[in-house]
Image (cartoon, grey):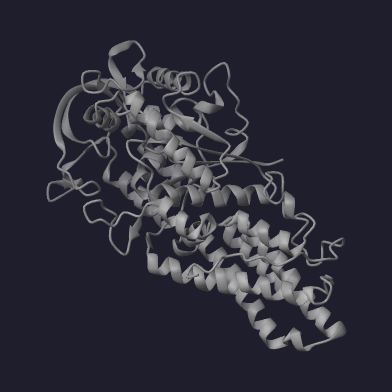
């Protein structure tokens, strides 16, 4: 069976998770679910980035140890993702000395053996928010554009990774046909422009006096590994790479896709493949880059009081409506906006009225006909809908794919209004209702990657034979997307409210 391996950026647990974390995890989860539904043996990994200066400083301010800080905050991420039905297979923690440390240490040794690490005295501007040294040209009014803070000037002795050596190789990797594909394509051009400007070597360690919360540098007890070798290696450390526990199944034998935000694209597009190449490890296949999420058109900020707390959205609307909103409203690669007003309107129109009421109307009408299901011959519309939907899903155009489903739902609502089955009798009525109930079965399949619980509830109400198995990782759609494929489906179930009226 062909394999897929999909990962997200690992989250920094110096505070509770925010909507940006949710956007990324939902995006990756939709992809992972689609891979599984398409018949791929899929591994989906997420986790937390627990070392570094930010956690060390946050812990000091709170009067706790860094370990106490991360051990307290990591469950906040896991609990939220479990609540959101993020179907990850493995959750990696970079403080895991048994799973993570060994690969990181061996990778460092490999890079040193390859002549890619060099110790230097260094004076530069350091942004603790980015956890990296930055240049003057990256500043806006003397401040980091991402964190709105002035960097501090730091002079210290560090190990450097000689990234500049790989400029030509990286350019080739990012442009050749079977190289490292950046999605969407305009994000690739941004990365290539960085190469054209000239790549600089990157700081790979910090003195222990500045950073002691991290993995020690092999054979140099005065230095602590910096974020790059530690954090980026999370993608292969749970596979036991470069150790005696090495299992290459989901790296060498799989198509590897990293899902990350645009603010860390350069690290995944440039630093990471260069590290892997010099360690003799296969480079990833795809880099899926998403944008930022604003609140009511503004950057989310505690000072502005516009931070959207994920649990508050879930408490009001439910898990699937939030997943639906993020998937529908934020095209992959572009920035998106969370608006409470837009969320309410989408809940009422797309979910409660279009999908929920369609299902309820059809099931009520079938109920008056002893719940009998009789699917007529195949309308061509279903083949066209599946073809367009699959093309969008396979190209990571998830928002467009979901809009195809919404258009399909609208077409069904128009069909029932046109045919008026409540005024028909006999074969005419049975045929119209058969078309509608079969269309709803297909809508349920198409919605499954986006709103899994809703999709299963729809099919349970429809009485579809496979409904109880829809959330299993082994469930595939190939033999189910053909019109009339469920020959044993003769009876529908009872209607229940799919999306409640929040005003009542």
Provide residue 239's location: percent of width, then percent of height: 56, 27
Q: Nearer the viewer, residue 256 or 180?
A: 256
Judge whether 85 appears above or below 235 on screen.
below
Left or right of 200? Residue 503 is: right
Provide residue 177's location: percent of width, then percent of height: 53, 48
Q: Nearer the viewer, residue 63 or 229?
A: 63
Q: Residue at x 65, y 74 (%)?
A: 358
How many numbered marks have been drawn onto this rendered protein structure?
Answer: 0
Query: Do we see residue 475 in this rendering?
Result: yes
Q: Residue at x 52, y 49 (%)?
A: 84
Provide residue 264's location: percent of width, then percent of height: 36, 43
Provide residue 69's location: percent of width, then percent of height: 34, 29
Judge whether 179 appears above or below 48 on screen.
below
Query: Do we see residue 179 in this rendering?
Result: no
Left or right of 269? Residue 439 is: right
Left or right of 3? Residue 504 is: left
Q: Residue at x 16, y 33 (%)?
A: 124
Residue 155 falls in image quadrant = top left
Q: Quadrant of the N terminus?
A: top right
Judge whether 368 appears above or below 147 on screen.
below
């Amino acid at each position: 069976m062909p394999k897929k391996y999909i990962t997200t950026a690992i989250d920094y647990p110096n505070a509770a998770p925010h909507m940006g974390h949710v956007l990324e995890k939902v995006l990756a989860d939709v992809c992972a679910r689609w891979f599984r539904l398409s018949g791929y043996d899929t591994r989906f990994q997420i986790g937390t980035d627990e070392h570094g200066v930010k956690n060390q400083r946050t812990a000091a301010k709170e009067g706790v140890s860094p370990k106490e800080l991360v051990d307290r905050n990591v469950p906040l991420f896991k609990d939220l993702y479990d609540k959101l039905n993020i179907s990850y297979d493995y959750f990696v923690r970079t403080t895991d000395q048994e799973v993570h440390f060994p690969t990181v240490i061996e990778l460092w040794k490999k890079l040193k053996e390859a002549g890619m690490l060099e110790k230097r005295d260094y004076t530069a501007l350091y942004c603790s928010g980015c956890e990296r040294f930055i240049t003057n040209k990256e500043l806006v009014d003397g401040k980091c554009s991402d964190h709105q803070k002035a960097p501090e000037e730091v002079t210290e002795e560090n190990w450097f990774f000689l990234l500049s050596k790989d400029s030509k190789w990286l350019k080739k990797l990012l442009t050749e046909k079977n190289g490292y594909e950046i999605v969407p394509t305009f994000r690739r051009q941004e990365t290539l422009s960085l190469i054209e400007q000239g790549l600089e070597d990157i700081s790979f360690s910090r003195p222990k006096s500045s950073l002691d919360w991290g993995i020690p540098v092999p054979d140099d007890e005065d230095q602590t590994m910096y974020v790059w070798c530690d954090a980026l290696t999370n993608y292969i450390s749970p596979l036991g790479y470069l150790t005696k526990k090495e299992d290459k199944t989901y790296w060498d034998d799989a198509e590897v896709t990293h899902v990350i935000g645009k603010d860390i694209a350069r690290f995944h597009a440039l630093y990471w493949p260069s590290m892997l190449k010099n360690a003799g490890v296969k480079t990833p296949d795809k880099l899926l880059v998403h944008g930022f999420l604003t609140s009511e058109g503004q950057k989310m900020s505690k000072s502005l009081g516009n931070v959207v707390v994920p649990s508050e959205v879930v408490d009001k609307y439910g898990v699937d409506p939030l997943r639906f909103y993020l998937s529908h409203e934020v095209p992959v690669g572009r920035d998106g906006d969370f608006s409470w007003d837009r969320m309410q309107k989408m809940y009422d129109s797309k979910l409660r009225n279009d999908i929920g009421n369609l299902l309820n109307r059809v099931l009520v009408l079938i109920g008056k006909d002893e719940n009998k299901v009789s699917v007529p011959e195949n309308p061509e519309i279903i083949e066209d809908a599946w073809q367009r939907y699959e093309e969008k899903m396979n190209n990571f155009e998830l928002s467009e794919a979901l809009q195809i489903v919404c258009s399909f739902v609208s077409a069904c609502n128009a069909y029932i209004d046109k045919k008026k089955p409540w005024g028909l009798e006999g074969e005419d009525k049975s045929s119209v209702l058969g078309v509608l109930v079969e269309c709803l079965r297909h809508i349920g399949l198409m919605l499954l990657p986006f709103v899994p619980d809703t999709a299963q509830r729809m099919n349970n109400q429809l009485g579809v034979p496979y409904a109880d198995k829809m959330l299993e990782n082994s469930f595939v759609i190939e033999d189910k997307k053909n019109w009339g494929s469920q020959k044993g489906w003769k009876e529908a179930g009872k209607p229940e409210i799919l999306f409640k009226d929040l005003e009542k």
